[in-house]
Amino acid sequence: MIEHIRELEKMARQLEPDSTARASLREPVIDYTEDFLNTIYDRKAYETDYGNPQAFFESPVSEEGKDVEELLTYLQENVDKPGLNPASGGHLGYIPGGGIYTSSLGDYIADITNTYAGVYFAGPGAVRMENMLTQWMAGLVGYPGTAAGNHASGGSIANLIAIVTARDAFELKAKDYDKCVIYLSEHVHHSVDKAVRIAGLKECVKRYIPLDERYKLIPEKLEEAIEEDKKQGLIPWLVIASAGTTDVGAVDPLEEIGQIANANNLWYHIDGAYGGFFTLVDECKDLLKGMDRSDSIVMDPHKGLFLPYGLGTVLVKDADKLQQAHHYFANYMQDTTERNIEARSPADLSPELTKHFRGLRLWLPLKVHGLAPFRACLEEKLWLTRYFHEKIKALGFETGPEPELSVSTYRYLPPSGDVNAFNEQLVKEVQKDGRAFISSTMLHGNFTLRMTAVAFRTHLEIIDTLLEVLEKGVDKLLNE
Ligand SMILES: *Cc1c(COP(=O)(O)O)cnc(C)c1O
């Protein structure tokens, strides 16, 4: 038996490379990432050639290991090259990605130490750090000290946690779901719809409130709808507003909606996954006024603070509500319950138990750089968007509303032919060039182009490049 155990140990120990072996694994990886970073401004934002669809299936998982350098070549060819490059400053399409380096170092440490950040009892330091960060964010929003939050993997899960909290806080009964009313706008992010469905609430009545000409929810219409629903014997329950819609970057009138929600005792949720962190920029404070009136809010550090993907935060004004919806008492965890804010366990505030120490990927960059560069980077994006909006108008494009945050909408009106088809072709021209990547949306049935500046590597040069690509694209299509 001992012999067998020893034999297995010998094989198993391959999972524990020694210092020399670690160096020979690490160095090629570092070379790879250094090459990526040193050439990032020259790399394409989008590659239309998707490469070999079978690449990974042709190299299946097997008993024997492979050389790391060979694997990195594989990665380069089959992962980093095709499709969108979310680390690129030319990613001006969806709400872009970030990927600040210092955050990756936080992940590196968290992965090596495998620090447990689920339960205070086991990982008090990690849990305190994560709770300090949610408290900091709660302070940005204007929440009182009773607030708590959770660092989830992204805004979608963060929205789900908020919806579930709202459901339980109101003690909704399944038999009443079809009478409970959710108020929202057509421009609410689809992850909220999804969250409502996953939370088992798809039978709820959804009341889409009309929008003004800037795609902002009209508070008076909300008030009317609530009154009408009450008269009908329905149960107004939840209002969802956006602090920065994905489509056009509009901020709903958060303060007015908050007053209405508060006066009618509704749960008020704000989706600030994209726009919430713009509150760090002084000039946005007015625009975002009213966030403190919400009961829950979502803010994505992997958008607004430029972190690599994997961090979206939910904040709930009343910590007990968040905890009541998500705690679980297992006998084997009887030593672990704490009610002080700094000691609340993420496992009691979210669906997760074993969880990655996500706090470190946020804490390290905030502490290393300080806040000033984050504020500047966000403000730069506002100005780049205004600059783009002005320039694209000057090029003869029809433009949407003046950007409130960092989304500009526009389309070209050719003298003849199908306008939608023309603009669809124009997006393809930009993609073919590949230096910048833009996306599109439908507004009032019009195929509309979007330029979104949220990537931290987006600076003036790439905006000028995009303008040039669009101008050339229009010329080309007009001459065809
Ligand atoms: C991106 C986004 C989401 C979804 O967040 P993920 O982090 O992608 O899961 C929700 N709402 C808005 C407004 C967003 O921009």
Image: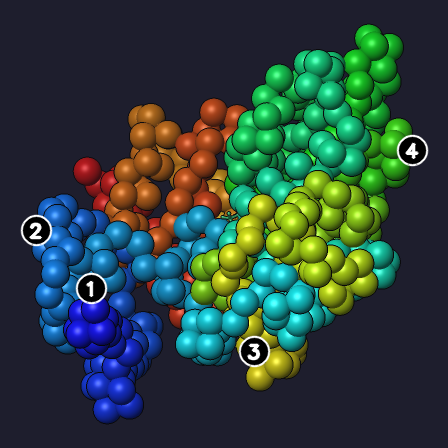
Asked which secondary structure carries label 4, the reply is: helix
Q: Nearer the viewer, residue 53 or 274?
A: 53
Mark 4–mark 3 Cα distance, whole angstroms, equals: 41 Å
Q: Which residue is mark 1?
A: 75
Q: Position of residue 412 (x, y in %)?
A: 40, 39
Pointers 2 and 1 in contact (C-beta within 8 Å)? no
Tag in front: 1 or 4: 1
Q: In the image as oriented, which residue stretches furthest toward the right?
A: 263
Q: In the image as oriented, which residue stretches furthest toward the bottom?
A: 20
Query: If you read the primary sequence from the N terminus, does the residue marked by circle 3 or circle 2 appear first?
Result: 2
Res 58 label? 2
Residue 199 visible, this orientation = yes
Name the amino acid type tagged 4. Ala
Pointers 4 and 2 in contact (C-beta within 8 Å)? no
Q: Which residue is found at the position 52% from the left and 72% from the top?
A: 115
Tag in front: 4 or 2: 2
Pointers 1 and 4 in contact (C-beta within 8 Å)? no
Q: Nearer the viewer, residue 157 or 264?
A: 157
Pointers 4 and 3 in contact (C-beta within 8 Å)? no
Mark 4–mark 2 Cα distance, whole angstroms, equals: 61 Å
Query: If you read the primary sequence from the N terminus, does the residue marked by circle 2 or circle 1 appear first?
Result: 2
Q: Which residue is mark 4?
A: 263
Query: If you read the primary sequence from the N terminus, does the residue marked by circle 4 or circle 3 appear first?
Result: 4
Count of numbered labels shown in the rendering: 4
Crowd rating for badge 3 (residues with CA inside 10 Å; few <14, some 14–19, many 20+): some
Any atom of ligand 1 within 8 Å of the CB at mark 3? no
Left or right: where 37 falls relative to 294? left
Q: Which residue is found at the position 66% from the left and 66% from the top?
A: 121
